[in-house]
Amino acid sequence: MSKSWIMNSFKVIVALMILGGVTGAAMAEEVKVGAGAAATENIFNKIKDPMEKANGVKLNVISGGPVQALKDLDTGAIEAAAGGLTFPDWMAMMEKEGYAIPDKSIYKNRVIGKDVVKVLTNKDVTVTALSKEQLTAIFTGKAKNWSEVGGPSKPIVVIVGTKIPGTNTVFQKQAMNGEPYTKDAVEGTTIDDLKAKVASTSGAVSLGATAQIDATINAPTIPEIGRPITLITKGAPSAGLQKMLDFIAGPGQQLIAK
């Protein structure tokens, strides 16, 4: 066996390996989605890795909230926007933010899941259940001390997130009868930031997701406050996005239910 034959064979093998790598890279699909807290926590974080293993679609989630997500969709920065609110409520929220949408018919929307809003408190707030009337009193600021709603004698510290407008709107509508949040609320940002602030602040209370409940905070039982998780595209979804939607509707259901 000549040296030239060995060298030529080696070159062929290397070339095939390189070609295989290029082909694999070319076949890999990335889907970029903008999302709010509800969609991120309840769906995308749960399906991301299993979906990539199952169908090769890599999910890139930009969790900037539903308002920013729709703006990014309009500029073409993302393929889809997802948020925890109905399509009409989403459009109304954009108008409230001063974002003009001349023609809503350019959007295609579908419901891809459901979110249940939870109330999180600091562990020193030992209440086990709160009614809608009590929730309204707490988040509007009418109740100033936890002792007024069956808790310990501690000042109530309401924390409201600026990056979860969908969650705030749904809770305000369903739990607070549309009344405004207290002007004395401490400002937070994302749901992760809110949870961290609640865990470190005595008497604190805020909104969160089911997936966030653990031993670091208290989550009293409240009446169910839910909303659909809506996904919006402009026109028909791309091939990669359709694969993601098919995965969510199929094997992803078992992951989302956990």
Image: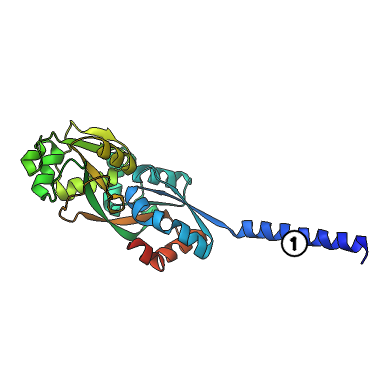
**With 76 as the anchor, is 124 left or right in this view?**
left
State whether residue 238 appears in this view: no
Residue 166, position as x, y percentages in the image: 28, 46
Tag count? 1
Query: Quarter-wise, where is residue 202 in the image?
Result: top left
Residue at which label 1 appears: 16
In the rendered image, the vertical position of residue 213 relative to residue 4, given as above or below: above
- Residue type of the residue flagged with mark 1: Leu
Residue 146, position as x, y percentages in the image: 11, 39
Give the color scheme: rainbow, by chain, secondary structure or one colour.
Answer: rainbow
- Furthest-right residue in this view: 2
Residue drawn at point x = 16 percent, y = 40 percent: 139
Residue 167, position as x, y percentages in the image: 26, 47
Query: Quarter-wise, where is residue 12 in the image?
Result: bottom right
Between 60 and 199, the one nearer to me in the picture: 199
**With 210 as the anchor, is 106 left or right in this view?**
right
**With 107 as the anchor, is 54 left or right in this view?**
right
Q: Residues within 10 Å of mark 1 (few under 14, many from 20)?
A: few
Residue drawn at point x = 72 percent, y = 60 percent: 17
- Furthest-top residue in this view: 184
Please tell me whether mark 1 sits on a helix, a strand or a loop. helix
Residue drawn at point x = 13 percent, y = 40 percent: 138
State whether residue 172 appears in this view: yes
Residue drawn at point x = 36 percent, y = 66 percent: 254
Residue 211, position as x, y percentages in the image: 31, 53
